[in-house]
Every structure is written in structure tokens, then in C-alpha cells.
Amino acid sequence: MSLKDKYGSWALVAGGSEGIGAAFADYLARQGLNLFLVARNKEKLQNFCDFLTKAYAIEAIPIQCDLADRDACHQIIQQTKEKLIDILIYNAGLSYIGKFEENTSSHHQNILQINVMTQTLLIQALSKQMLEKKRGAVIVMSSLAGLQGAGFLTAYAATKAYCRVLGESLYYEWKDRGVDVISCIAGATSSPNFLNTKPSDTGLIKPSVQKPEEVVAECFQRLGKTPSFVCGRGNKLASFIMHRLLPRWLAIKIMGDTTRKMYRIDQ
């Protein structure tokens, strides 16, 4: 059964103009779904929507919105209220790499707003229609950083732990009500955001970098079958070692040491 037959004809991708979000959008467009794509960069968003519309003969509607705005959810709902959203993918995420105390309070607030509050409110708002018609899907993007303490990624890692638990909890609540929910636990991905951080080689211990398309394909393979999963064989192996074989203090140390070396952070 195709995604369109199973869930419906409209999807919304938050953070959908590049990287994993763009890969999700392209995958859905190939399946014949119409799209709302949410991002902050108007020109990039419009260009990508134009490409999808021409390439796949679907509707791709841009929604320019800063997901850090306190009323971002309201803005999105107002622009999509004429359609039933059948698949929601919340790919947007904001991070800070460095010492926790050196980040600004406003940036900390934006991390929490984008990664936690806007996502939670948007899922709550759009899920009501899905539950009423007893079909739909929600994909929540988590991260390996959220599986344990992650020094120098502190606020981001904490919010991604929230994302994992949010998706897993809703998986349980809605699994018998026709709405599939999954938390996709991604590692390093060759998206513009990751590449722009200019990570350095850490030697023997380094992240397994996946292509966005690989993450998306595995996500849809597992949607409806499991509450959460770790993307990629290398990441699965690393996660098994870190969380099944090592004491937690050592897993936290390895994570923090690796990040410090990747981004040349002085302690």
C-alpha cells in the first residue's frame, strides 16, 4: 500500500527546505503527496517548492515562518486550515555547540521554543483531525545526542531526549487509533547544517555520517512498526555499545570528549 493510500494526500514538513527535511519532502512528492513546507528562508523555500511542483506534478505550498516565534504554531495552522494534514514531519531543530554558560539566554530560549514548544503544539493541533478520521502519521526527529548526557551540546541534547520520549509516548497512545508515530534517532547526517559546523576528524572514535536520503528511507520502512529507532548500522552498533555495554558515566564521557575534539573546544 502506498503512503497516499494509507495516510492521505497532504503532508507538512517543518524544516523542509534543505537537508533531511528536503529529503523527506522529495520522498513524499515522489509518492504523489501534496506538501506544505515550512522554513524561514523565503527564497530557498519558494525555489524548492517550485522544483517539486514541476518535477512531480504535485502541489507544494511554502509557509515562511520562524519556528522560534511564540505564535509559530498559530501561523502554520492559519495557513493550512483549508486542508487536512495527513502526515506531519517535524524535522526542524536548533542547536548550540560549545560551553553551556557561553550561549545567550535568548538562544537557549529559541532552542527550547523550536525543539520543544512549537513542535508539541503543532503535533497537538494537527493530530486532532488525524484521530477523528482514524488515520495519519507523525514523525519526530530525535538524535543520538539525546540518548545520554552530551557535553557541549547540552540544551540541544536535552531537547532531543524530549523528542524521543514524546514520539514514543504518542506511539503508545495512538497505535490503536489509526495514527502511526515514530521517533527517528539520527546521528551525524551530511546536511548543510551539519557540514556548516565544520567538524574535524576525531581519530578512531568518530560519528558515522549518513546521507539524508538514507535516514528518510529507513524511517518510512519502520513507520508503524516500532516506537523509535536508531538510523544506520554504524550508529546502531555505537548505540548498543554505549548504552548496553558501557557504564553510563563512560558513555557520557565518550560523547563529551568526541564533541570537544570535533569542534576544538578548550576546557
Image: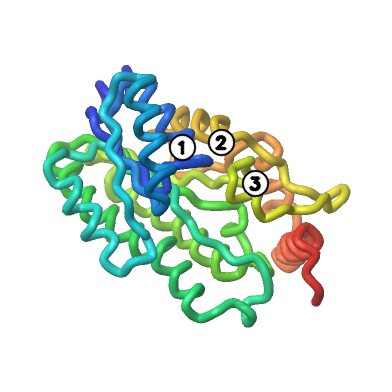
Mark 1 surroundings within 10 Å by alpha-carbon count, few (fewer than 14), some (14 through 19), many (20 or more): many
The quadrant of the rendering that contains the N terminus is: top left
Contact? badges 1 and 2 (CB < 8 Å): yes
Q: Report the Cα–Cα distance between label 2 and label 3.
A: 10 Å
Residue 19 screen position, x and y as percent: 53, 41
Q: Which label belongs to residue 212?
A: 2
Whichever of labels 1 and 2 marks the residue nearer the N terminus, that label is: 1
**Which sits in the foreground, 47 or 168?**
47
Type of amino acid under label 1: Ala
Residue 138 appears anywhere in the view: no
Whichever of labels 2 and 3 marks the residue nearer the N terminus, that label is: 3
**Pointer 3 residue:** 188
Q: Nearer the viewer, mark 1 or mark 3?
A: 1
Query: Residue 72 lies in what quarter of the image?
Result: bottom left
Residue 214 screen position, x and y as percent: 57, 31
Contact? badges 2 and 3 (CB < 8 Å): no
Residue 267 position (above or below residue 50) = below
Give the residue drawn at x 50%, y 81%.
Answer: 105
**Pointer 1 residue:** 22
Residue 113 appears anywhere in the view: yes
Q: Report the Cα–Cα distance between label 1 and label 2.
A: 8 Å
Mark 3 surroundings within 10 Å by alpha-carbon count, few (fewer than 14), some (14 through 19), many (20 or more): some
**Which sits in the foreground, 239 or 141?**
141
Give the residue drawn at x 67%, y 55%.
Answer: 197
Mark 2 surroundings within 10 Å by alpha-carbon count, few (fewer than 14), some (14 through 19), many (20 or more): many
Give the residue drawn at x 44%, y 48%.
Answer: 91
Residue 261 position (above or below residue 206) = below
Type of amino acid under label 2: Pro
